[in-house]
Amino acid sequence: MQNNHIPTILIIGAGPGGLLLYHGIQKRLNKNGKKFNVKIFERDTGPRDRWQGFGVFINSHGMRSLISCLPESHVTRLPEVIPIPISEIESRGLLISDDKGTELLRVRSPKVKSLSELAKVSNSNVNAFRDRLRDLMLEGVNIQWGKKCIGYDEVNDELVDRIITMNGNSLTHQSISQDGDALTLGLCLIPIETDITANTPEHQIHYPAMIHYSYYTHWDTINQNVHVNDDDPQSVIDHVKNLIKQHRRPCELTDIYLELLSLIPVSSPKESEISFFRSYNPPRRRPMLDINPSSIEPWESSRVTLLGDSIHAMNPVMGLGINGALRDADLLVKCLSNYEKDGDKQCIQNYENIMRIRASRDVLTSRSPGLRINIPKSKYKNLFMSIYLTGKL
């Protein structure tokens, strides 16, 4: 922030959190007079620079933040990007079992008729088109694309930014093994087409499916014979099959996992297969750093703060990441409403005190139950592999 007549807020990153912060400031703080100048920078060269993923979970907390911070023109259009499951045809639920398929937990989300109703129901959520939600949030925002913040200087209590141009709704089953790995199958309840109605024949409805397998990094490092080419989908699939055979007990559920992995194409589908695979993203291993929030020492608040993925080491399986970012933005807007009385540093300190408690709880919740078995106090790396495919399941 700059200590001028009208303070300037620099937002680095045009993700859901940064965009909602922008909208929240304009809607709730600049409504009756301009209190802040807001500039937002994004290192991507445009909104299609990177694949954004297909769907994200929006829970009741995230929905309340969206409704609170987005302009009314955007709120009325949320059903376009966050559709409610079709009654009597679609439903939402979560099933967690052990590696033999014995049920440990089953949760069914309550049915709601509108997004505003969802915001009032605790522990309820729907699935949103991630790219379409971001496109909606981008409307009316002046993004400075292709720029990255490489640092900042405090000069005479002023923030001098240094910006350089850069070149360049779901059914889920999670199975937990005694060895500490976890395998999740997810069926996204948002059809690929947007013109699906209650009268559409079932065989014409295509849903995206996701297979996610997480395991300890040292399973690869202790075995010198492991050679995986992450640019070769067949190599990744074969590697995961071997891990499942090594660490999962032989049973019908294990056989199902292996069969599902065998169905995954190793290259983009041919023209004759388009009717089955409407979209395809090759499998890859993705490293993640699992950090216990209690291991992070308190920090001194300044006029720079973080929100969303930049501060929370969130496991994506539970779908809490985007909701944390939305709630962070909502909270920061609320704290900044006291700027004239408290000043910037105190506002940010108030935000961080509340954010840290809530977000730490969510980070602990998001950590895969399988990975919490005999977890060491020190941080360690585990490997995360997602396989996204779409078909008539």
Image (spheres, helix red, strand yellow):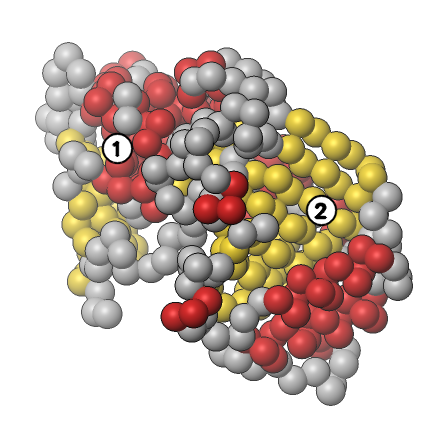
Q: Name the residue nearer the viewer: 223 or 170.
A: 170
For the N terminus, the quadrant is top left
Mark identifier at residue 22: 1
Name which residue lies at 54% across and 52% down.
392
Q: Name the residue nearer the viewer: 106 or 352.
A: 106
Q: Position of residue 3 (x, y in %)?
A: 18, 32
- As helix, strand or loop, the secondary structure at mark 2 comes to strand
- As helix, strand or loop, the secondary structure at mark 1 comes to helix
Name which residue lies at 27% across and 56% down.
48
Left or right of residue 25, residue 279 in this image: right
Name which residue lies at 56% across and 39% down.
170
Q: Name the residue nearer the viewer: 349 or 181.
A: 181
User: How would you rate the neighbour count of disc 2 (Cα within 10 Å): few for under 14, some for 14-19, many for 20 or more?
Assistant: many
Residue type at the position of mark 2: Gln
Which residue of the protein is positioned furthest toward the right in this rendering? Answer: 250
Q: Position of residue 29 (x, y in %)?
A: 23, 19
Seen in the picture, residue 61 relative to 137 is either above or below; the reply is: above
Q: Quadrant of residue 294 in the image?
A: top right
Q: Is residue 259 visible?
A: yes
Mark identifier at residue 174: 2
Q: Position of residue 11 (x, y in %)?
A: 27, 41
Residue type at the position of mark 1: Tyr
- The total number of labels drawn is 2
